[in-house]
Amino acid sequence: MKDVMLQVKDLSVNYGHVEALKKINIDVKRGQITSIVGANGAGKSTLLKTISGLVKPLEGEILFEGQPIPKRAHKIVSQGIVHVPEGRRTFSGLTITDNLLVGGFLSSGKELSDNIEKQFELFPILRERKNQFAGTLSGGEQQMLAVARGLMSNPKILLLDEPSMGLAPLIVNQIYEIIQKVKDRGITVLLVEQNAKKALSICDYAYVIENGEIKLQGTGEELLNSEEVKKAYLGGK
């Protein structure tokens, strides 16, 4: 199991009397893109929030590199687990550069400036607009900034929640090219998406979640070719 970076074991989460997750089990392998797909409200975002310490589980455990993750969110980040939330949530009143500085709170000096330069290499549009306020950016540019800000913490694994939400198809393609580049840099990715076709086309392995339970799993290619997945998520017959 050395190649498994993140393990979720029998994880259950309740919101009051509502069962959001029911004994979820997933493995995320080092250096791969793992996708979690499913309809809105299936429990996908809850899973990421629980991994990143924003939601407390009812039962089960989460192991990172073989050890239980810390209880507090900031300690989870310092271990290398970084969550880019749904809805981008950039700091609209700060410039692009200042947003990146906030994301780089774990580093300082030359490491910090080098990290910013790495993000500008990955996202040239952010370099062009580095002194622009985040609130004036387009949706696609804000998504790029949200990912870049997450990368400023030097993650071992990046949790991406609905990165294509609300974006035009051309911009979605750009975002997915960036996700592939993130993987190419050696960063493991756990991707949550409603856009099942896009997520399955890029990932190494995937899980389909329905009503808080894992219903199907397999390689991205296997699930793209699954008649059940086609009918439910890809508009197939």
Image (tube, grey):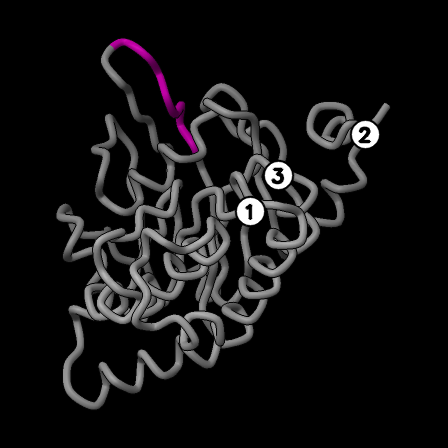
* Residue type (three-letter) at the residue carrying disc 3: Asn
Category of crowding for the residue at label 1, using alpha-carbon neighbours closer than 10 angstroms: few (below 14), some (14–19), many (at least 20): many
Residue 22 lies in the magenta-colored region: yes
Q: Nearer the viewer, residue 141 or 159?
A: 141
Residue underneath mark 3: 195
Tag 1 secondary structure? strand
Q: CA distance from mark 1 to mark 2?
A: 18 Å
Category of crowding for the residue at label 3, using alpha-carbon neighbours closer than 10 angstroms: few (below 14), some (14–19), many (at least 20): some
Residue underneath mark 1: 35
* Residue type (three-letter) at the residue carrying disc 2: Glu
* Residue type (three-letter) at the residue carrying disc 1: Ser
Q: Nearer the viewer, residue 38 or 8?
A: 38
Q: Are marks 1 and 3 in contact (CB under 8 Å)?
A: no
Q: Nearer the viewer, residue 136 or 97?
A: 136
Residue occupying image coordinates x 62% and y 39%: 195
Residue occupying image coordinates x 62% and y 47%: 199
Tag 2 secondary structure? helix
Tag 3 secondary structure? loop
**Apparent side of residue 46 relative to residue 194 in the rendered image (left or right):** left
Residue occupying image coordinates x 60% and y 58%: 176
**Apparent side of residue 181 relative to residue 27 in the rendered image (left or right):** right
- Nearer the observer: mark 2 or 3; the answer is 3
Q: Mark 2 or mark 3: name the one nearer the start of the chain.
A: 3
Residue 162 x, y percent position in the rendering: 48, 42
Q: Mark 1 or mark 3: name the one nearer the start of the chain.
A: 1
Residue 182 lies in the magenta-colored region: no
- Nearer the observer: mark 1 or 3; the answer is 3
**Apparent side of residue 74 relative to residue 213 in the rendered image (left or right):** left
Q: CA distance from mark 2 to mark 3?
A: 17 Å
Q: CA distance from mark 1 to mark 3?
A: 11 Å
Q: Which mark is residue 227?
A: 2
The magenta region covers: 17-24
